[in-house]
Image (cartoon, rainbow, N blue to C red):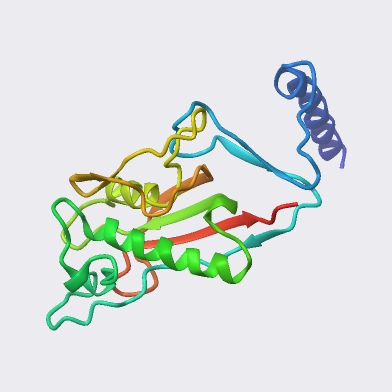
């Protein structure tokens, strides 16, 4: 018990010493509005936020993990090709440079948009995101670049200072984004050995907050 008491005392003292160099660095402690979420963003065109602070009285929505929907029923399609969204890519024909991860990412994010709408929300309300990527068949690692191209079709595609809509990449082409959205969620992305559905290369879950 004595050792435990000493440990607690050390932690308390350490915390008291550490706080002034961080939270008090600007002369005050940041506190989010109790009814709002505040994203910390660096620069005018970042990909993601540095983090998000959520007020104690914010109403928020937490999604389940969601992957792409199987829509490609073409004979001979591989497990991964079944999840090419044929409403975006007719006949499951991918334009130059568009990867399977990119196509599946677009598919998964479109499904998330539908679920957000059912909950009375939109992509603009998303404040955090977790992404799980599996390496495509025959590849040694995840296709992070393809995922980022899919992500930017729905998020982080405006200049925060000017409001200008940014062009984004769809494979090798430069296009307007599918959904114009200034939101920069906090985000992490991990490569995993296997996703739960055969053929999935992407699974995403999000947190979104309701407006005051």
Q: Is residue 148 above or below residue 70?
A: above
Q: Quadrant of residue 107?
A: bottom left
| Residue 124 vertical position relative to residue 31 in the rendered view, above or below | below
Left or right position of 202 against 1: left
Left or right: where does residue 156 sit relative to residue 141?
right
Split into 4 quadrants, where in the image is the N terminus? top right
| Image x and y of residue 101, in percent | 28, 58
Q: Is residue 193 visible?
A: no
Q: Nearer the viewer, residue 27 or 45?
A: 45
Query: In front here: 194 or 205?
Result: 205
User: Total number of numbered labels?
Assistant: 0
Observer-nearest residue: 121 or 99? 121
As drawn, 167 above or below 16: below
Q: Position of residue 181 (x, y in %)?
A: 48, 47
Q: Residue at x 18, y 74 (%)?
A: 78
Q: Position of residue 25 (x, y in %)?
A: 72, 17
Asked whether 34 or 179 is in front, the reply is 179
Q: Is residue 178 visible?
A: yes
Please give the name of the residue rendered at 41% of the width and 39% of the height, measured from the top-left corner. 165
Residue positioned 70% across, 22% down in the render:
22
Horizontal arrangement in the rendering, residue 33 relative to residue 119 (left or right): right
Relative to 55, is 74 above or below? Answer: below
Name the spot of residue 58 as percent of width and height, x first.
76, 52
Splitting the image into 4 quarters, where does residue 105 fall?
Answer: bottom left
Q: In the picture, residue 139 is in which quadrant?
A: bottom left
């Amino acid at each position: 018990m004595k050792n435990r008491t000493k440990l607690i005392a050390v932690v308390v003292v350490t915390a008291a010493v550490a706080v002034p160099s961080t939270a008090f660095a600007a002369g005050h402690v940041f506190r989010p509005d109790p009814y709002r979420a505040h994203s910390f963003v660096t620069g005018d065109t970042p990909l993601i936020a540095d983090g998000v602070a959520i007020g104690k009285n914010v109403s928020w929505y937490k999604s389940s993990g969601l992957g792409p929907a199987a829509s490609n029923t073409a004979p001979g399609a591989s497990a991964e090709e079944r999840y090419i969204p044929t409403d975006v890519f007719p006949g499951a024909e991918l334009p130059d440079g568009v990867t399977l991860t990119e196509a599946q990412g677009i598919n998964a994010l479109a499904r998330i948009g539908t679920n957000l709408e059912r909950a009375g929300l939109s992509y603009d309300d998303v404040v955090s995101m977790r992404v799980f990527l599996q390496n495509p068949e025959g590849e040694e690692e995840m296709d992070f670049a393809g995922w980022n191209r899919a992500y930017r079709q729905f998020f982080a595609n405006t200049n925060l200072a000017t409001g200008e809509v940014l062009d984004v990449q769809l494979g090798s082409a430069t296009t307007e984004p599918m959904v114009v959205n200034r939101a920069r969620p906090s985000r992490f992305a991990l490569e995993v050995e296997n996703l739960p559905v055969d053929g999935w290369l992407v699974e995403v879950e999000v947190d979104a907050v309701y407006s005051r």
